[in-house]
Amino acid sequence: MRKNLLLTLVPAVTSFFLPKIAWADEIDLGFITLSTDPARLAGQVLEFGYSVGTLFAILFIIIGGYEVATSAGDPERLEVAKGRITAAVMGLVFLFASVLILRVIGCGIIDIDSNIICG
């Protein structure tokens, strides 16, 4: 008896709340608004990832430049700084190459809705 009551109450209670969530076009989290459309949500996630990746790469280039400037002729510290700059530049190259690949695949085939990727 108790199990039957739960089986009838759970769908009734959840159906009261679900239409409000399921029919929403966007979810406002206060600091960001996310779309419920999968293509737009994928575009928003990719835009955020590219922004964070570019920010970190530029930060590591700046840190590497500072380390080169303060290495004081120490060849070991200079090589570490050069390696950091090289890794950051290669990260940017891979990041922009992924944008190019996703532009071909994501915009042409999958139809991802993103301003950064699809231009």
Image: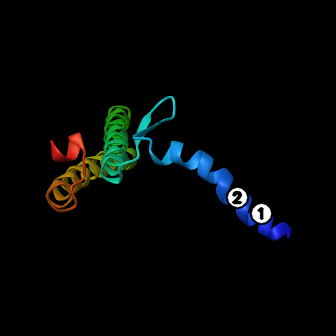
2 and 1 marks in contact (CB < 8 Å):
yes
Q: Is residue 3 left or right of residue 66?
A: right
Which residue is painted at 35% across and 49% down in the image?
A: 37
Q: Residue furthest right?
A: 1
Which type of secondary structure does the marked residue at label 2 adopt? helix
Alpha carbon separation for disc pair 2 and 1? 6 Å
Which residue is painted at 17% across and 46% down in the image?
A: 118
Q: Which image quarter is the C terminus in?
A: top left
Nearer to us in this view, 97 or 21? 21
Q: Is residue 30 left or right of residue 109?
A: right
Q: Residue furthest top?
A: 30
Residue 43: x %, y % from top left: 30, 47
Q: Residues within 10 Å of mark 2 (few under 14, many from 20)?
A: few
Check residue 10 in the rendering and tell me which mark sits there, or answer none: 2
Which type of secondary structure does the marked residue at label 1 adopt? helix
Residue 77: x %, y % from top left: 39, 45
Which residue is painted at 30% across and 45% down in the image?
A: 85
- Number of marks: 2
The amino acid sitting under disc 2 is: Val
For disc 1, the marked residue is 6
The amino acid sitting under disc 1 is: Leu
The image quarter containing residue 35 is top left
Q: Is residue 15 left or right of residue 87?
A: right
Position of 117 relative to 104 (above/below): above
Nearer to us in this view, 104 or 90? 104
